[in-house]
Image (cartoon, helix red, strand yellow):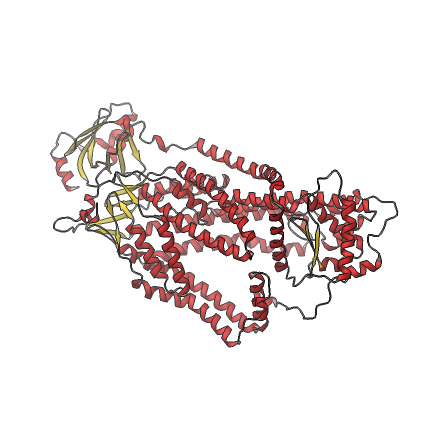
Amino acid sequence: MSASILAVPGGSKRYATVRFEESTKGSFWFITKGLILTLVTVGIYRFWFTTAVRKNLWARIFIDGSPAEYVGKAYELLLGFLVALAVLLPAYIIVFVATMYLPYPALGVVAASVLFFLLLQFARYRARRYIASRTLWRGIRFRQDGSALIYTWLAAGWWLVTIVTLGVAYPFMRASLERHRVRHTLLGEARFTSDASGLSLIVNWLIVYALSILPLLGCAVLLLAANDFEVPEEAFQGDTIVENALAVYLHFLKIMPIAKLKATFYTILISIMFGMLAKPYYQAREARSFYNSIKLGDARIYSDLSAADMYINKFFFYFINIATVSVLSAPLFAVPFLITKINLYNTIEKIYYGYIVFAYAVCVLMVSWSYFRFLQVGRFAIVSETLSITGAEALTLVRASTRKVGSSFDEGMADAVDPGGIDVGF
Amino acid sequence: MTRGCRFWNRLPSVRRGHAVALPNSDAAGLAPRDVSGEGVYFDGTSANPIPVSVRVAGGRLILDGSVRRAWDCRDLRASGSIRPFMRVGPSWNSERIELSDEAVVAAIEAASPELYSRDRVPYRLIGGSVAAAVALLVFVLYGVPIVADLAVPAIPLSFEQRVAEVARKQLSTTLFASRECQVPSGRAALDEMVASLKIEAWDPALHLPPVEVDVRVIDTPVANAFALPAGNIIVTSGLIARARSADELAGVIAHELGHVAARDPTRLMLQELGRSLVLGFFMGDVFGSTVLVALGNEVVTARYGRAAESAADAFAARAMNRVGADATAIAGFLERIDPDDYGPPAFLRSHPFTRERAAAIRAQAVTGRETRAILDDEAWLALKAICPPQRVPRIQIDPVSTR
C-alpha cells in the first residue's frame, strides 16, 4: 500500500500538535539508580536501563493527543547482544590474526578501522529497524525496510566523497542518508517520504566549515608552503608506515621554527573551540530542515527548532561538568604542595588515593547523569516539543501492517559494535 | 473530543461528580459507585480515533458509543504512560482506549488488580545481573589465564614469530631506536654470554619451548630488556651502557630467558587479548563502567605480570647459580636502574617493587663461594662497544613544540 492512500478527499487541513510531557519529577533518581546499577553490574544492567528510559521517553511524546509506546523488552536486547557477541568474537580474533600477516602492521590498523566503520553503519541501520518495530502509536507499529547492506555502501560511498572534497560534501551526505532512512520507514502500511536536500544546508554548513575546518586546512597548507616543505628521503626508508610517518614528523619538527609551531597549535585549539561552538547551530538547522522534509501522505511534519534550543542543553551539560570537575580536582592540586611543605607523604598517600577514587566516582556519575538528562532526554524533549503536524486528518487513515516483527539481533549487534552505546533517540 | 462531550451529555443518568470521591470511599469500605467519563477508542489495526464514553461499573470497563465493549477489569493491562493519561485494553487483543480523566483512571486502577503487573520492581532481575557480573569478573580473573595456558601450546611457532617481528618493529618505533647494534666483536661476546646461560639454565624439570633464542640489541638510551614471543629477546644499548659488569647484564638476559622458558610473552598476550575481548564487549555506553573495567583490567594484568616477573627472577637466580656467576649482581643492577622512588601504587605495577625483587633474588643466590666471571674482560669490553657511535646527531625534539 502506498502513501498516496493517505490522501484525504478535499484536502487535509487540520493542525495537530506534538507535546512533550516535561514533568521530570523523580527523573533524577530514575537516572541515578539506572546508572549506578549499570556501573555495579559492569554494564549488564544497561539493557534494562535503556528499555526503561525509552518506555519513559516514548510515553512522554503526545502526538495529536496520543503518546507513543515503546514495547521493546530488555531481554530482547540482551539476547541480541549475546548472539552478536557469538558472531563478532571469532571475527575479532580473525581480524587480529590477519593483521599480523599483513606486510605493514599500520595497514592492519587501517583495514580494521575501515571494516569496523562499515560494520557500524550496518549495525546502526539494523538497530533503527529494531527500535522502529518496537514503537507504537495508536496501536500501529512503525517499521523499517530496505537492506542494511545497501545503506552501508551508500554511507561508505558518501563518506569517501566527503573526505575527497575535504568535508564540503558533508551536508549532501547527511541529506542523502536521511532520505534513505526516512523513505524506508513506515507507520503500519503507510510509508514516510523525505525530500531532505543538502543544498538547502550548504550555507549553514559552510559557516561552520569556515570557522572550524578551513583554518586547519589553510594552516597546514600555508605552513608547508612557507617552509618549502619537501618530503624527506627518510620517509621511504623505514620498514613500516609508522616509521615513515615518524620520519616525516621529525623532519617537520626540525625545519619548523618554534613560533610557527606555536601559531599552528593555537590555530588548532581555536578551530576546535569554534567547531564545538558552531556545531549545535548546524545540528539545529539540519534537524529542522530534515524534519520539515518528512511527509506521511498528506500529513506533514513542521519543526520550528531554533539553534538556541540546541545550545541550552549543551550549555547545562558543559557547565555542570566543568563545575564538578573543577571543584573536585581543586584539593588534588593542593596535596603535592602539602607534601613538599610537610613530610606527610606516607600519611597522606592513602587519603590521597581514596579521594581520587571518590572524586572519580562523583565525576563519572555527574557526567553520565548530565549526559543523559541534557544531551539525550533534553534534546529528545526539545526536538519533539518544537514539532507539529499539518494535514493531520491523513493520520486517521493509517492502517497496521500484518507483517512479522523483526528480531532483536539487529540492535544487539549495534550495542556490541557501537562505542557510543545504545542511543535512546529514534 | 467535542463529539465525545455531546455524546456524554445524552446520558444524564451518569453524573461526573462521583468520580473524585471514589478512591476514598473504596478505602473507607464503602461500595464503589459507577464512575464515567470519556475516552478515545483504537481498534489496534487503524489509527482512526473513535470517541466513546467510558464507565467503570461492577468490575467491568464499559465502552459505549459507535463501539460497544465490556471488558472485565481483571483482564485489563495499562501500557506505560504518564498520569493522568492512561492507555488501557484487554490482555488478549490489541484494542485500546486512551483516556485522561483522572476519576476514571483512578477507578480503573482500583478495580484492576493486574493493571501494572509487568511494571513491578525487577529485584530478581537486578540480582541476576549482579550475579552475572560477578561470574564474569571471576571468569576474567581466573578463567582467562587458565584458557590462555591451555591455548599456548596450540599457537603455531610461525605465528609467534610473526607477532615477534611486529612487536620488535613497534618497540623500535616507540623507543626511537634508529638501528640494531651489530658490531661483530660485540655480537660474538653477546652470543657467548647467551650460549653459556642457555646451556646451563634450562632446568630439566622445565618444559623447554622448541624455540631458537635470538637476542638483539637496539640503539636507544632507554635502559630496558624485553622478551617477545618465539624466543626473541630485545636488549637496549642503554641497558648495556649502565651495566657495570658482565654478570649484571647476564642476569637481565637470564631473567628474559626465564620469560622465554615459561612462554610468558605468548601467554600474557593471549590473556590480555582474552580479557580485553570479553570486557570490551561487556562495556556499554556508560563512561563509568568502561573506565572502571579498564582499570580492573590493568589491575588483573599487572597482577599476573608480577607473578610472571617473580618467576623469571627465580629462573635468573637459578641460572646464574648454575653458571657459577654472581646472582646478586642482578639485585644490585635492578636497584640502580629501577629504584622505587616514584611510580604507581603496588596493585597497578606490572613488576613487583624492586626492594622485594632484590630481596628475593639475594635469598636465592648461592653465596660464599668463588664466583666465575661470565665473560672475560676483553669480551665484556667488546660487548660494551656493540653499538658504534652515531655519526649523525640525533634529532632533538623540543618539548615546547609539542605543548
User: How many dots with numbers?
Assistant: 0
The one of A240 and B20 positioned closer to us in this rendering: A240
| Residue positioned 44% across, 48% down in the render | A418
In this rendering, would B337 be left or right of A264? right
The one of B39 and B20 positioned closer to us in this rendering: B39
| Residue positioned 75% across, 46% down in the render | B316
In this rendering, would B23 be left or right of B128? left
Q: Quadrant of residue B302?
A: top right
In this rendering, would B351 be left or right of A220? right
Up/down of A337 relative to B4, above or below = below
Q: If the image is split into quadrants, where does the N terminus of chain A sit?
A: top left
The one of B388 and A282 positioned closer to us in this rendering: B388
In this rendering, would A243 be left or right of B55? right
Can I make out residue A143 in this image?
Answer: yes
| Residue positioned 77% across, 58% down in the render | B188
Q: Quadrant of residue B319?
A: top right
Image coords of residue B222 (percent x, y)? 68, 59
Up/down of B83 relative to A381, above or below = above
| Residue positioned 27% across, 46% down in the render | A186
Can I make out residue A26 in this image?
Answer: no
Image coords of residue A268 (percent x, y)? 48, 66
Image coords of residue B28 (percent x, y)? 29, 25
Up/down of B159 relative to B82, above or below = below
Image coords of residue A164 (percent x, y)? 41, 64
